[in-house]
Amino acid sequence: MDEWSGRKWEPVTEERLLRAIDVLVEIAKEHGPTFNPVLETVRQELHDFRRRNQRAADQIAGNSLRKAS
């Protein structure tokens, strides 16, 4: 746990969420279903992240279309 104390907090990215899911899957394989709730939470975060990014991309595209008209 000491390793985390000096870590810099960085923005959440899709790549980081996917990496976290991979790590949690490996932990769940080794230690059983105890970590499944954490895994599901991270999967939900990834789903929410993708939905927010899609919404933002749709808004940008909509604004570009209005300006072009």
Image: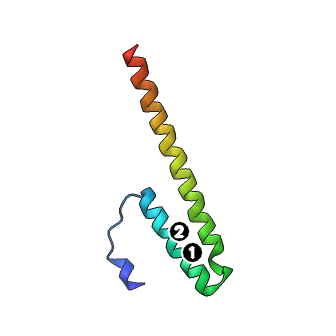
When asked about the image quadrant of residue 34, the answer is bottom right
Q: Which mark is residue 51?
A: none
Residue 57, given in percent of the width and then of the height, sits at 45, 37
Residue marked by disc 1? 25
* Outermost residue toward the right in this view: 33
- The residue sitting at 38% across, 18% down in the picture is 67
Q: Residue at x 53, y 68 (%)?
A: 21
How many residues crowd around disc 2 within 10 Å: few (fewer than 14), some, or many (20 or more)?
some
User: In the image, what residue type sits under mark 1?
Assistant: Val
Q: Is residue 16 left or right of residue 52?
A: left
Position above or below: 23 against 45 = below
Q: Which mark is residue 21?
A: 2
> Is 28 left or right of 18, judged from the image as shown?
right
Q: In this rendering, is residue 36 above or below 17?
A: below
Within-10-Å neighbours for mark 1: few <14, some 14–19, many 20+: some
Q: Position of residue 24 (x, y in %)?
A: 54, 75
Q: Is residue 65 above or below residue 21?
A: above
Q: For the point 39% across and 24% down, which residue is it?
A: 64
The image quadrant of residue 4 is bottom left
Picture layout, residue 57 above or below residue 28: above
What residue type is disc 2 on?
Ile
> Residue 45: horizontal and vertical position, in percent?
55, 58
- Identify the secondary structure beneath mark 2: helix
Labels 1 & 2 near each other (Cβ < 8 A)? yes
Residue at position x 63%, y 66% in the image = 40
